[in-house]
Protein backbone atom coordinates (compact mmCIF):
# COMPACT_ATOMS: atom_id res chain seq x y z
CA UNK A 1 0.00 0.00 0.00
CA UNK A 2 1.42 3.37 -1.02
CA UNK A 3 1.26 6.06 1.64
CA UNK A 4 1.76 9.84 1.39
CA UNK A 5 2.07 12.60 3.98
CA UNK A 6 0.34 15.99 3.97
CA UNK A 7 0.76 18.91 6.33
CA UNK A 8 -2.70 20.08 7.40
CA UNK A 9 -2.75 23.88 7.36
CA UNK A 10 -5.79 25.67 8.78
CA UNK A 11 -6.93 28.56 6.57
CA UNK A 12 -10.47 28.96 7.90
CA UNK A 13 -12.22 29.46 11.22
CA UNK A 14 -12.37 25.77 12.14
CA UNK A 15 -9.48 23.37 12.60
CA UNK A 16 -9.31 19.83 11.29
CA UNK A 17 -9.59 18.12 14.70
CA UNK A 18 -12.83 20.02 15.41
CA UNK A 19 -14.18 19.00 12.03
CA UNK A 20 -13.33 15.32 12.53
CA UNK A 21 -14.98 15.32 15.96
CA UNK A 22 -18.11 16.93 14.48
CA UNK A 23 -18.35 14.36 11.68
CA UNK A 24 -17.77 11.45 14.07
CA UNK A 25 -20.70 12.62 16.20
CA UNK A 26 -23.14 12.36 13.30
CA UNK A 27 -25.13 9.25 12.30
CA UNK A 28 -23.58 7.48 9.29
CA UNK A 29 -26.27 8.62 6.87
CA UNK A 30 -25.71 12.27 7.84
CA UNK A 31 -22.01 12.05 7.05
CA UNK A 32 -22.60 11.55 3.32
CA UNK A 33 -21.74 14.38 0.97
CA UNK A 34 -21.74 14.54 -2.82
CA UNK A 35 -18.29 15.68 -3.94
CA UNK A 36 -17.88 16.15 -7.70
CA UNK A 37 -20.54 13.54 -8.43
CA UNK A 38 -19.36 10.91 -5.91
CA UNK A 39 -20.83 10.14 -2.51
CA UNK A 40 -18.18 10.26 0.22
CA UNK A 41 -18.51 9.34 3.89
CA UNK A 42 -16.00 9.33 6.73
CA UNK A 43 -15.78 6.63 9.39
CA UNK A 44 -13.36 7.55 12.18
CA UNK A 45 -11.92 6.52 15.53
CA UNK A 46 -9.95 8.67 17.96
CA UNK A 47 -7.27 7.25 20.25
CA UNK A 48 -5.17 8.43 23.16
CA UNK A 49 -3.05 11.43 22.31
CA UNK A 50 -5.69 12.69 19.86
CA UNK A 51 -4.50 10.39 17.09
CA UNK A 52 -7.27 9.86 14.58
CA UNK A 53 -7.80 6.77 12.43
CA UNK A 54 -9.83 7.68 9.35
CA UNK A 55 -11.50 5.80 6.52
CA UNK A 56 -12.96 7.85 3.68
CA UNK A 57 -15.43 5.72 1.72
CA UNK A 58 -16.47 6.58 -1.80
CA UNK A 59 -19.86 5.01 -2.57
CA UNK A 60 -20.75 4.38 -6.21
CA UNK A 61 -24.05 2.92 -7.34
CA UNK A 62 -22.55 1.50 -10.54
CA UNK A 63 -19.57 -0.83 -10.61
CA UNK A 64 -17.94 -3.98 -11.97
CA UNK A 65 -19.70 -7.25 -12.67
CA UNK A 66 -19.42 -10.58 -10.88
CA UNK A 67 -17.07 -12.82 -12.89
CA UNK A 68 -15.71 -16.35 -12.90
CA UNK A 69 -13.86 -18.56 -15.39
CA UNK A 70 -16.85 -20.72 -16.33
CA UNK A 71 -19.76 -18.25 -16.14
CA UNK A 72 -20.73 -15.08 -18.00
CA UNK A 73 -20.21 -11.83 -16.16
CA UNK A 74 -23.27 -11.07 -14.07
CA UNK A 75 -24.69 -8.31 -11.94
CA UNK A 76 -24.41 -8.40 -8.15
CA UNK A 77 -27.49 -9.03 -6.08
CA UNK A 78 -27.72 -5.79 -4.12
CA UNK A 79 -30.49 -3.70 -2.64
CA UNK A 80 -31.48 -0.54 -4.49
CA UNK A 81 -29.83 1.65 -1.85
CA UNK A 82 -26.57 -0.34 -1.79
CA UNK A 83 -23.48 0.45 -3.87
CA UNK A 84 -19.78 -0.28 -4.19
CA UNK A 85 -17.48 1.19 -1.56
CA UNK A 86 -13.91 2.29 -2.36
CA UNK A 87 -11.87 3.19 0.71
CA UNK A 88 -9.00 5.55 1.41
CA UNK A 89 -7.58 5.23 4.92
CA UNK A 90 -5.86 8.01 6.80
CA UNK A 91 -4.49 8.98 10.18
CA UNK A 92 -4.15 12.45 11.66
CA UNK A 93 -1.93 13.44 14.58
CA UNK A 94 -2.98 17.06 14.87
CA UNK A 95 -0.43 18.30 12.36
CA UNK A 96 0.02 15.76 9.56
CA UNK A 97 -2.57 13.81 7.61
CA UNK A 98 -1.14 10.48 6.42
CA UNK A 99 -3.15 9.03 3.54
CA UNK A 100 -3.35 5.72 1.74
CA UNK A 101 -3.17 6.04 -2.04
CA UNK A 102 -6.11 4.22 -3.62
CA UNK A 103 -6.60 4.76 -7.34
CA UNK A 104 -10.33 3.99 -7.02
CA UNK A 105 -10.96 5.54 -3.61
CA UNK A 106 -11.34 9.23 -2.66
CA UNK A 107 -8.17 11.21 -3.36
CA UNK A 108 -6.76 14.16 -1.52
CA UNK A 109 -8.58 16.90 -3.48
CA UNK A 110 -12.01 15.38 -2.81
CA UNK A 111 -11.10 14.57 0.78
CA UNK A 112 -10.11 18.22 1.32
CA UNK A 113 -13.41 19.43 -0.15
CA UNK A 114 -15.37 16.89 1.93
CA UNK A 115 -13.74 18.08 5.16
CA UNK A 116 -14.13 21.73 4.17
CA UNK A 117 -17.85 21.19 3.60
CA UNK A 118 -18.30 20.18 7.23
CA UNK A 119 -15.95 22.90 8.42
CA UNK A 120 -18.09 25.49 6.68
CA UNK A 121 -21.19 24.01 8.29
CA UNK A 122 -19.63 24.32 11.75
CA UNK A 123 -18.66 27.91 10.98
CA UNK A 124 -22.20 28.69 9.83
CA UNK A 125 -21.56 28.58 6.08
CA UNK A 126 -23.45 26.78 3.35
CA UNK A 127 -22.96 23.14 2.35
CA UNK A 128 -21.82 23.93 -1.20
CA UNK A 129 -18.54 23.96 -3.07
CA UNK A 130 -16.60 26.97 -1.92
CA UNK A 131 -13.60 28.21 -0.03
CA UNK A 132 -11.30 25.50 1.30
CA UNK A 133 -10.86 25.60 5.08
CA UNK A 134 -7.81 23.35 5.05
CA UNK A 135 -4.79 23.26 2.80
CA UNK A 136 -3.26 19.79 2.61
CA UNK A 137 0.33 20.43 1.52
CA UNK A 138 2.28 17.38 0.30
CA UNK A 139 5.43 16.68 2.30
CA UNK A 140 8.54 16.45 0.13
CA UNK A 141 11.68 14.44 0.77
CA UNK A 142 14.37 16.35 2.62
CA UNK A 143 16.68 16.76 -0.38
CA UNK A 144 13.84 18.06 -2.53
CA UNK A 145 12.85 20.54 0.18
CA UNK A 146 16.44 21.79 0.33
CA UNK A 147 16.63 22.17 -3.43
CA UNK A 148 13.34 24.05 -3.48
CA UNK A 149 14.45 26.33 -0.63
CA UNK A 150 17.84 27.09 -2.19
CA UNK A 151 16.66 27.81 -5.71
CA UNK A 152 18.26 31.10 -6.64
CA UNK A 153 17.54 31.04 -10.37
CA UNK A 154 14.86 28.95 -12.08
CA UNK A 155 15.63 28.58 -15.77
CA UNK A 156 12.69 26.45 -16.88
CA UNK A 157 9.69 24.49 -15.73
CA UNK A 158 7.88 21.70 -17.57
CA UNK A 159 4.39 20.52 -16.60
CA UNK A 160 2.19 17.80 -18.11
CA UNK A 161 -1.28 17.07 -16.79
CA UNK A 162 -4.40 15.08 -17.67
CA UNK A 163 -7.18 17.47 -18.52
CA UNK A 164 -10.26 15.50 -17.32
CA UNK A 165 -8.82 14.98 -13.85
CA UNK A 166 -7.70 18.58 -13.42
CA UNK A 167 -10.98 20.01 -14.74
CA UNK A 168 -12.93 17.88 -12.24
CA UNK A 169 -10.87 19.25 -9.35
CA UNK A 170 -12.45 22.43 -8.01
CA UNK A 171 -10.09 22.70 -5.05
CA UNK A 172 -7.48 25.26 -4.19
CA UNK A 173 -4.71 23.28 -5.87
CA UNK A 174 -6.22 24.00 -9.28
CA UNK A 175 -5.56 27.74 -8.99
CA UNK A 176 -2.15 27.57 -10.67
CA UNK A 177 -3.79 26.30 -13.86
CA UNK A 178 -7.17 28.02 -13.71
CA UNK A 179 -6.43 30.64 -16.37
CA UNK A 180 -5.33 28.07 -18.92
CA UNK A 181 -8.17 25.69 -18.09
CA UNK A 182 -10.73 28.38 -18.90
CA UNK A 183 -9.63 28.32 -22.56
CA UNK A 184 -12.29 26.46 -24.64
CA UNK A 185 -9.52 24.68 -26.56
CA UNK A 186 -8.67 22.66 -23.43
CA UNK A 187 -12.12 21.09 -23.46
CA UNK A 188 -11.16 19.03 -26.52
CA UNK A 189 -7.81 17.86 -25.14
CA UNK A 190 -6.85 14.82 -23.06
CA UNK A 191 -3.38 15.91 -21.98
CA UNK A 192 -1.55 19.22 -21.96
CA UNK A 193 2.21 19.83 -21.72
CA UNK A 194 3.60 23.25 -20.85
CA UNK A 195 7.18 24.48 -20.96
CA UNK A 196 7.96 27.79 -19.28
CA UNK A 197 11.45 29.23 -19.75
CA UNK A 198 13.20 32.30 -18.37
CA UNK A 199 14.83 34.83 -20.68
CA UNK A 200 18.27 33.97 -22.05
CA UNK A 201 19.93 36.89 -20.27
CA UNK A 202 22.53 36.07 -17.67
CA UNK A 203 21.03 35.78 -14.16
CA UNK A 204 17.49 35.75 -15.55
CA UNK A 205 14.97 33.60 -13.66
CA UNK A 206 11.32 32.74 -13.44
CA UNK A 207 9.58 34.30 -10.41
CA UNK A 208 10.78 32.20 -7.47
CA UNK A 209 7.77 32.64 -5.19
CA UNK A 210 5.37 31.64 -7.94
CA UNK A 211 7.51 28.61 -8.85
CA UNK A 212 7.56 27.41 -5.23
CA UNK A 213 3.80 27.92 -4.91
CA UNK A 214 3.21 26.05 -8.17
CA UNK A 215 5.25 23.10 -6.91
CA UNK A 216 3.13 22.91 -3.74
CA UNK A 217 -0.08 23.15 -5.76
CA UNK A 218 0.83 20.71 -8.50
CA UNK A 219 2.45 18.05 -6.31
CA UNK A 220 -0.91 17.99 -4.53
CA UNK A 221 -2.49 16.94 -7.83
CA UNK A 222 -0.01 14.07 -8.24
CA UNK A 223 -2.46 11.59 -9.76
CA UNK A 224 -3.40 13.94 -12.61
CA UNK A 225 -0.02 15.60 -13.16
CA UNK A 226 2.38 13.35 -15.08
CA UNK A 227 5.40 15.66 -15.29
CA UNK A 228 6.75 18.43 -13.06
CA UNK A 229 10.39 19.09 -13.82
CA UNK A 230 12.34 22.21 -12.92
CA UNK A 231 15.80 23.30 -14.02
CA UNK A 232 17.32 25.60 -11.38
CA UNK A 233 20.56 26.56 -9.70
CA UNK A 234 21.66 28.60 -6.70
CA UNK A 235 23.69 31.20 -8.64
CA UNK A 236 24.43 31.93 -12.28
CA UNK A 237 27.81 30.21 -12.00
CA UNK A 238 26.47 27.11 -10.22
CA UNK A 239 25.79 23.94 -12.18
CA UNK A 240 22.16 23.29 -13.07
CA UNK A 241 20.28 20.03 -13.38
CA UNK A 242 16.62 19.09 -13.78
CA UNK A 243 14.76 18.06 -10.64
CA UNK A 244 11.68 15.81 -10.90
CA UNK A 245 9.39 17.07 -8.16
CA UNK A 246 6.81 14.31 -8.67
CA UNK A 247 9.43 11.82 -7.54
CA UNK A 248 10.34 14.11 -4.64
CA UNK A 249 7.17 13.42 -2.69
CA UNK A 250 7.58 11.60 0.64
CA UNK A 251 6.21 8.10 0.11
CA UNK A 252 6.15 4.73 1.86
CA UNK A 253 5.09 1.37 0.43
CA UNK A 254 4.00 -1.07 3.17
CA UNK A 255 2.46 -4.50 2.50
CA UNK A 256 -1.06 -4.94 3.90
CA UNK A 257 -2.85 -8.24 4.44
CA UNK A 258 -6.20 -8.90 2.84
CA UNK A 259 -9.19 -9.81 4.99
CA UNK A 260 -11.49 -11.69 2.65
CA UNK A 261 -11.64 -9.73 -0.61
CA UNK A 262 -10.74 -6.40 1.00
CA UNK A 263 -7.62 -4.98 2.51
CA UNK A 264 -8.54 -4.85 6.19
CA UNK A 265 -9.30 -1.48 7.70
CA UNK A 266 -7.33 -2.12 10.90
CA UNK A 267 -4.44 -3.47 8.83
CA UNK A 268 -4.41 -0.33 6.69
CA UNK A 269 -4.55 1.87 9.77
CA UNK A 270 -1.62 -0.04 11.28
CA UNK A 271 0.43 0.56 8.09
CA UNK A 272 -0.36 4.28 8.21
CA UNK A 273 0.71 4.54 11.84
CA UNK A 274 3.90 2.64 11.00
CA UNK A 275 4.70 5.16 8.27
CA UNK A 276 3.88 8.07 10.59
CA UNK A 277 6.08 6.71 13.39
CA UNK A 278 8.97 5.98 11.00
CA UNK A 279 8.86 9.43 9.41
CA UNK A 280 8.66 11.06 12.82
CA UNK A 281 11.63 9.04 14.11
CA UNK A 282 13.66 9.87 10.99
CA UNK A 283 12.92 13.57 11.28
CA UNK A 284 11.13 13.63 7.92
CA UNK A 285 8.00 15.22 9.39
CA UNK A 286 8.97 18.55 10.89
Image (tube, helix red, strand yellow):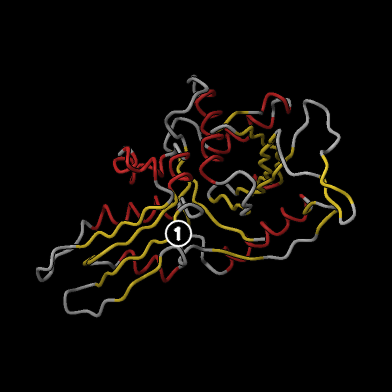
User: Measuring 39% from the left and 57% from the top, which residue is drawn there?
Assistant: 160
Q: Residue 93 in the image: x percent, y percent?
A: 60, 49
- How many numbered marks does the figure carry? 1
The structure residue drawn at horizontal position 76% and vertical position 49%, both measured from the top left corner, is 265
Q: Where does residue 120 sit, x and y in percent of width and height?
A: 50, 26
Q: Quadrant of residue 151?
A: bottom left
Secondary structure, mark 1, is: strand
Identify the residue under disc 1. Answer: 226
Q: Nearer the viewer, residue 145 or 163?
A: 163
Query: Residue, x 29% and y 62% (percent of image)?
Result: 157
Taking 129 as reference, is 195 left or right?
A: left
Could you say where residue 224 lies in the image, as x and y percent from the top left? 48, 52
Residue 202 drawn above or below residue 43: below
* Outermost residue to the left: 201
In the rendered image, residue 82, in percent from the top left (x then y), is placed at 78, 31
The residue at 54%/51% (across/down) is: 96
Up/down of 57 relative to 272, above or below? above
**58 lies left or right of 264:** left
**Is the residue marked by circle 1 packed among few (<14), some (14-19), or many (20+) residues within 10 Å?**
some
Residue 119 against residue 150 in the figure, above or below = above
| Residue farthest toward the right in the current orientation of the protein | 70
Given residues 96 and 126, the one toward you in this image is 126
Q: Is residue 139 left or right of residue 104?
A: left
* Residue 212 relative to residue 68: left or right: left
Which is more toward the observer, 156 or 250?
A: 156
Location of the N terminus (image quadrant): bottom right
Q: Nearer the viewer, residue 21 or 270?
A: 270
Amino acid sequence: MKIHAFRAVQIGLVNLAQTLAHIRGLPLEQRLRDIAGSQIRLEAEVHAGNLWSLDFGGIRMEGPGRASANMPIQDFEMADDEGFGHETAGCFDGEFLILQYNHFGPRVARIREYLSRFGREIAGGADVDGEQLFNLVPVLKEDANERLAHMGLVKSMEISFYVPGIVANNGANRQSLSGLLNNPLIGTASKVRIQISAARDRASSLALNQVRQAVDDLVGLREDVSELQIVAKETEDSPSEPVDFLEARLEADIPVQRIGRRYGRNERWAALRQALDTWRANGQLQ
